[in-house]
Image: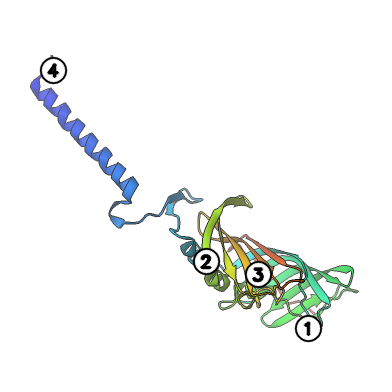
Amino acid sequence: MPSSRSIGLLSIVAIVVLAVGGLAFLLSRDGGDSGSSATPTRGASGTPTLAPETAADALSAAADRWDATDTAHFALTIDGQAFIDDERTIELRAAEGDIARPDLVEAQATIAVSLVTFNLGIIAVGDTMYQTNLVTGRWERAPDDFGYNPAVLFSPTEGIGAVARRVQNAEFAGSEVVGGRATRIVTGVLTGDDVSTITAGALEGDIVQTKVWVADDNSDIVKVELRSEPAAGNTPTTWTLLATNQNQPVTIEEPQV
């Protein structure tokens, strides 16, 4: 038969186990002394992180992250009409390439003139824009009214980060894996003025329906979708941007013309 000393020791151990278990339950339910109700998640490195408490928090964190991003690969697609010249004769259909802060770009764009589609090389070095000649393929200075420069994506006042901070009525709208990355979707609304610069004036109307896909692990902006709600009789336009390879090395050189 166990001694009274052994029984007493077992009782103490049992009390300690119950106390630790109860404390763990309270911490998991109430967030401990911090008072935070954020949901624990696990980042790419396996380090636990805290998911933003609200959709507005998620956008704020994503905007800060984008503003701290020095390079990225982007892929832009446009469903609808998006004119990039003053005469409204050149439509931008798609573009893909690399951008480097503050104002370097190298990309390939798909444009349409009337019913003919062309592939166009684009390089931007500061305010100087270059394009490939549609006939010869040689580099040349872009015309002054060429209204699309992807470097605007990194603009501190009109770029992706600034636009994310302007989203109104932000709400979570589920989750999705984009390019192998787990994301949370945030929806909201912007105005045509909010996105005029970043879309080269392609989206018309007072309301622009907005979706932003924010990476779970580090708040990278992985995808942005802007959809115009134009006046009756006009065609809606959807502007979709995918961003990958954030902060990976890129080399962009000014062409010889």
The circle drawn on residue 2 is 4
Q: State which tag comes first along the sequence, 3 or 1.
A: 1
Q: What's the CA distance linking mark 3 and mark 2?
A: 30 Å
Determine whether the residue tagged by mark 4 lies in a helix, strand or loop: loop
Q: Is residue 179 above or below residue 153?
A: above
The circle drawn on residue 169 is 2
Q: Amino acid at mark 3?
A: Ile
Determine whether the residue tagged by mark 2 lies in a helix, strand or loop: strand
The circle drawn on residue 99 is 3
Could you classify mark 1 by the number of other residues whose Cα lies within 10 Å: few (under 14), some (14-19), or many (20 or more)? Answer: few
Q: What's the CA distance linking mark 2 and mark 1?
A: 33 Å
Determine whether the residue tagged by mark 3 lies in a helix, strand or loop: strand
Residue 174, position in %: x, y? 55, 52
Instruction: Give the colour scheme shown.
Output: rainbow
The quarter of the picture where the N terminus appears is top left
Q: Amino acid at mark 4?
A: Pro
Q: Are marks 2 and 4 in contact (CB under 8 Å)?
A: no
Q: Are marks 2 and 1 in contact (CB under 8 Å)?
A: no
Query: Which mark lies nearer to you, 4 or 1?
Result: 1
Which residue is disc 1 drawn over? 86
Q: What's the CA distance linking mark 4 and mark 1?
A: 94 Å
Query: Which mark lies nearer to you, 3 or 1?
Result: 1
The circle drawn on residue 18 is none
Q: What's the CA distance linking mark 3 and mark 4?
A: 75 Å
Q: State which tag comes first along the sequence, 2 or 1.
A: 1
